[in-house]
Amino acid sequence: MKEDYYEILGISKSASAAEIKKAYRKKAIEYHPDKNPGDAKAEEMFKKAAEAYEILSDPDKRSKYDQFGHAAFEGGAGFGGGMNMEDIFSQFGDIFGSAFGGGFSGFSGFGGGQRRVKGSNLRIRVKLTLEEVAHGVEKKVKVRRKVQADGVTYKSCPTCNGSGQMTKITNTILGRMQTSTTCNTCSGAGQIMDKRPSGADAQGLITIEETVSIKIPPGVEEGMQLKVSGKGNGAPGNGIAGDLLVAIETEEHATLKREGDNLHYDLYISFSEAVLGSSKEIDAVGGKVRIKLEPGIQSGKILRLRGKGVSNINGYGSGDLLVHVNVWTPKELNREQREFFERMQSDENFVPKPQKSDKSFFEKVKDMFS
């Protein structure tokens, strides 16, 4: 089981944005690879702290995490997690200032100041049926993405001599000061294109169409975003590919309405079915199910079919299917029918006699959410 993000950073769930940033900076400095060369455990902690900060520093991601836990960013599609060192240094290096002597854009294990350029992310939308949402599904989608062309070669950048950094020394009243900036020629990659194949763009990339498999866990909701690492656009030279961001859309079901993990179904029955009882077949996400209606069932009765709802995104079982019974009152009657009901107006058996066990509307609503 994955560790809690708040526990990784050593903060409370009510921590402010400033407290989150301060806690991450402390952890990252403690476990930074330059301070712990060759220490695999420290590197793992460094990555965990960065992953926790990525989620908790973003108000929208933090809200989803507080509501759904790790499952809001995981589940086969690799959303939210799985950060590598390039992701960390490119995304969060700016919050460290001069903690490591002149910049946090790289570390010794990655060749000093040289950094690996990351390709741009791609975004797509995937529409799911209620059945797919309830049980999870694997979708295969076609994606047009850029990759390095066959035959492209790169050489060391002549401007920065492959370091990715430009160093400048200036004389000030405080003495000689050295500053480093990212090389404008290679954008910090330390390489530029040497041989450009036919059809490749200025970065040595070509566009291809690729089929990508996306594993979508059960219980996802409209608006959630999944991340498939490395399936975005490629990058030149020794760069790494961006990510494929998948926005979830859900189709409306003809008869079932979703509310959290529970599903609602409106069942309309005739007056005679309510009086005599009946057996009805209704829709459920796993197919049709048959339910029994006892004689004398009242309009407004809610039947709960446990476990027939949507699987919980955190793996805590499934919700329920709530069947709302509605007795349909005919608006038009023939002469014989009207005479029958006129006679029944004075019949004691047709006079309403609610029992204490018959719950009010508000009590029924309260039970639905208990």
Image (cartoon, grey):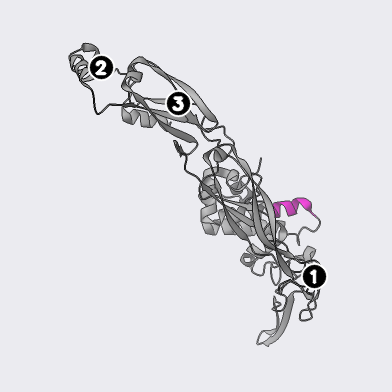
The answer to whether residue 297 shows anywhere in this view is no
Quadrant in the picture for residue 275: top left
Quadrant in the picture for residue 30: bottom right
Q: Are marks 1 and 2 in contact (CB under 8 Å)?
A: no
What's the mark number on residue 364? none
The outermost residue toward the top is: 348
Q: Is residue 68 left or right of residue 244?
A: left
Question: Quick check: 38 above or below 304?
Answer: below
| Label 1 to label 2: alpha-carbon separation | 85 Å
The magenta segment: 39-47
* In magenta stretch: residue 265: no
Nearer to me, 79 or 202:
202
Q: Looking at the image, is mark 1 or mark 3 earlier in the sequence?
A: 1
Q: Are marks 2 and 3 in contact (CB under 8 Å)?
A: no
Q: The residue under label 1 is which amino acid type?
A: Val
Q: Is residue 226 left or right of residue 178?
A: left
Q: The residue under label 3 is which amino acid type?
A: Arg
User: Residue visible at 32% across and 18% down?
Assistant: 272
Q: The residue under label 2 is which amino acid type?
A: Lys
Single out the mark in the foreground, 1 or 2. 1
Label 2's element? loop
| Label 2 to label 3: alpha-carbon separation | 24 Å
Magenta stretch: helix, strand or loop mostly: helix
Single out the mark in the foreground, 1 or 3. 1
User: Residue visible at 72% across and 59% down?
Assistant: 85
The residue wearing badge 2 is 353
What's the mark number on residue 304? 3
Label 1's element? loop
The outermost residue toward the front is: 335
Q: Position of residue 340 (x, y in %)?
A: 22, 15
Label 3's element? strand
Q: Looking at the image, is mark 1 or mark 2 earlier in the sequence?
A: 1
